[in-house]
Image: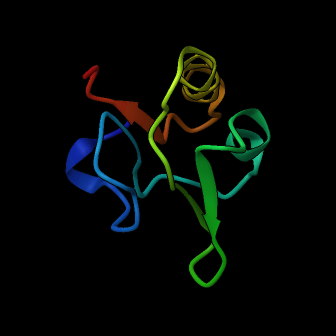
């Protein structure tokens, strides 16, 4: 389970976040490409844009559910 106290610093504010457990596998970025990006220099994913519609929310939830290390969290807001 993702830990909100260990969020990556480059996540934008909002309910979804990526924490420091990310292994940079790219699955989340393939699942939610409009919302999740890659920090090239540090090698991890982060939320670059919070979902703005139902489709983006669904993709973020799918990325969260499929993350192999449970590095994606949501505060449910």
Q: How many marks?
A: 0
Q: Residue furthest bottom?
A: 41
* Quadrant containing the C terminus in the rendered view: top left
Residue 75 lies left or right of residue 39; in this view the side is left
Q: Residue furthest left?
A: 5
Identify whether 74 is placed above or below 45.
above
Residue 10 lies left or right of residue 40; in this view the side is left
Q: Quadrant of residue 45?
A: bottom right
Picture coordinates of residue 30, whole percent (x, y)? 80, 41
Picture coordinates of residue 11, whole percent (x, y)? 39, 57
Picture coordinates of residue 64, whole percent (x, y)? 54, 28
* Quadrant containing the N terminus in the rendered view: top left
> Residue 39 or 67: which is nearer the viewer?
39
> Residue 36 or 55: which is nearer the viewer?
55
Q: Residue at x 25, y 43 (%)?
A: 4
Residue 19 lies left or right of residue 66; in this view the side is left
Q: Residue at x 55, y 14 (%)?
A: 54
> Residue 12 or 52: which is nearer the viewer?
52
> Residue 62 or 52: which is nearer the viewer?
52
Identify whether 34 is placed above or below 48.
above
Q: Residue furthest right?
A: 30
Residue 77 lies left or right of residue 8; in this view the side is left
Identify whether 57 is placed above or below 14.
above
Q: Residue at x 63, y 29 (%)?
A: 63
Picture coordinates of residue 48, whole percent (x, y)? 51, 55
- The colour scheme used here is rainbow
Q: Residue furthest front?
A: 53
């Amino acid at each position: 389970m993702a830990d909100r106290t260990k969020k990556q610093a480059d996540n934008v504010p909002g309910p979804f976040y990526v924490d420091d457990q990310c292994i940079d596998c790219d699955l989340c970025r393939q699942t939610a490409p409009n919302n999740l990006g890659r920090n090239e220099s540090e090698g991890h994913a982060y939320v670059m844009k919070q979902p703005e519609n139902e489709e983006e929310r669904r993709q973020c939830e799918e990325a969260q559910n499929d993350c192999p290390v449970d590095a994606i969290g949501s505060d449910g807001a």
